[in-house]
Image (cartoon, rainbow, N blue to C red):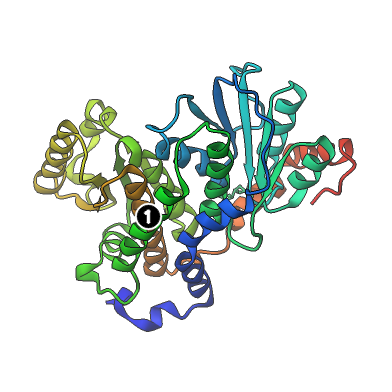
Amino acid sequence: MKLDTPESYERPEVRELLAQLRTELDGFLEGMMSAKNVSPKIPHDINSIVFLGVGGSGIVGDLLSDITAKRRDLPILCHKDYFRPPYLTRDALIVAVSYSGNTTETLSAMVEAYDAGLPTFAITSGGLMKEICKKLGIPVVEVRAGLLPRMAVPHMLGAAVSVLASAEFVRITTDEFKSAIEEAKRAQESVEVHKPLESNVAKYTANCIYNKIAFIYSHGYLSSVGYRLKCQLNENAKMLAVNQGLPEVLHNDIEGWNPAVANCLAVVMLRYKSEHMVIREALDRMETILKDRLGVAVSKIVSEGDSDITNILSAMVICDYVSLYAAIMRGADPIRVDRIRSMREGIMSNVRLLEQMARRFKVESK
Ligand code: PA5
């Protein structure tokens, strides 16, 4: 079996992703450390936290929103566009996240929010974002450079948690985070390369979906992990994937399935031990319909932890390994994202927006 054969891991780009995956979970604490000396002045009466960012950086807000769902009093919203959200009032705190620091959408929304007088802080490894923030006096957490943006998510998430927890907007202690990371490391070990396919849920899932379009069904606090898996399959394995949430799909999606699509679509269900009874029953019923009646391949990833943070981190790391294994099965290069690059560089108004910002702040355009 390809995934159990050591030679499958020899391509340099596979080795590179694997190396970043193996240190991924350590990024949380490193990210927290990077934020130690950054304490933006945040007014106490803010009424929402709005994350700006797209792609790998954009997922930081989604994950944080799920991680802290029961541990905060304010909503966390995620905005993935060139322009500041129209619904923003002056009482929102803006968190602009761009790993490269050169993403037009995030930079331009951040500058618009700054111009509107909103309290802002940024998380980046450098680029124009760092330069512009310096000019505008926007506090920046600088995380370690040199990673793939999507693999720097733990660093950026750790940084966001650190700032927001110190300002008492979210209630997570470093100890809680540490113990969740330790448990997630055990989940990671269970899907490592040396674990054979029969007992390795990440290899099994990748094998089910790699030559199909993956439909991911997620619920509750694993919704952001479902979205993360979709994005990782797109970028690392160069395949299409869709993330859909329960219970909504019980009212639409379920009608669309039929035996004719079983050849080209496969399902991944993200589940956790403590899911609500109604969700458990719904997912079990869906599985019976899809697998037994319609012949669709269904793979289940079950997070076994006792807390929401543990389940989110464990499911995330398992899903990241799914994307590595799917890349191997497809012979895809998990490092290069040439189309994303060609979109950034080929959309001329995107380039012009970036140049305008560089001119306005007298910094060098990248
Ligand atoms: O992982 C990736 O390479 C992409 O999804 C990037 O995160 C995305 O293009 C946005 O770039 P950045 O994260 O540097 O803002």
According to the picture, the residue beneath numbered tag 1 turns out to be 179
Q: Depth check: 285 or 175 in front?
A: 175
Q: Quadrant of residue 52?
A: top right
Q: Position of residue 115 (x, y in %)?
A: 77, 24
Residue drawn at the location 53% of the way across and 38% of the way down: 165
Tell me: 41 left or right of 279.
Answer: right
| Count of numbered labels shown in the rendering | 1
**Mark 1 neighbour class, 10 Å CA radius: few under 14, some 14 to 19, many 20 or more:** few
Q: Quadrant of the N terminus?
A: bottom left
- Secondary structure of the residue carrying tag 1 is helix
Q: Depth check: 91 or 177 in front?
A: 177
Q: Depth check: 137 or 225 in front?
A: 137
Residue drawn at the location 45% of the way across and 53% of the way down: 232
Up-down: is 278 above or below 156? above
Q: Depth check: 355 or 304 in front?
A: 304
Q: Amino acid at mark 1?
A: Ser
Q: Position of residue 363 (x, y in %)?
A: 87, 45
Up-down: is 222 above or below 211? above
Q: Is residue 67 visible?
A: yes
Q: Is residue 151 visible?
A: no
Residue drawn at the location 16% of the way across and 31% of the way down: 278
Q: Position of residue 45 (x, y in %)?
A: 59, 19
Residue drawn at the location 50% of the way across and 64% of the way down: 334
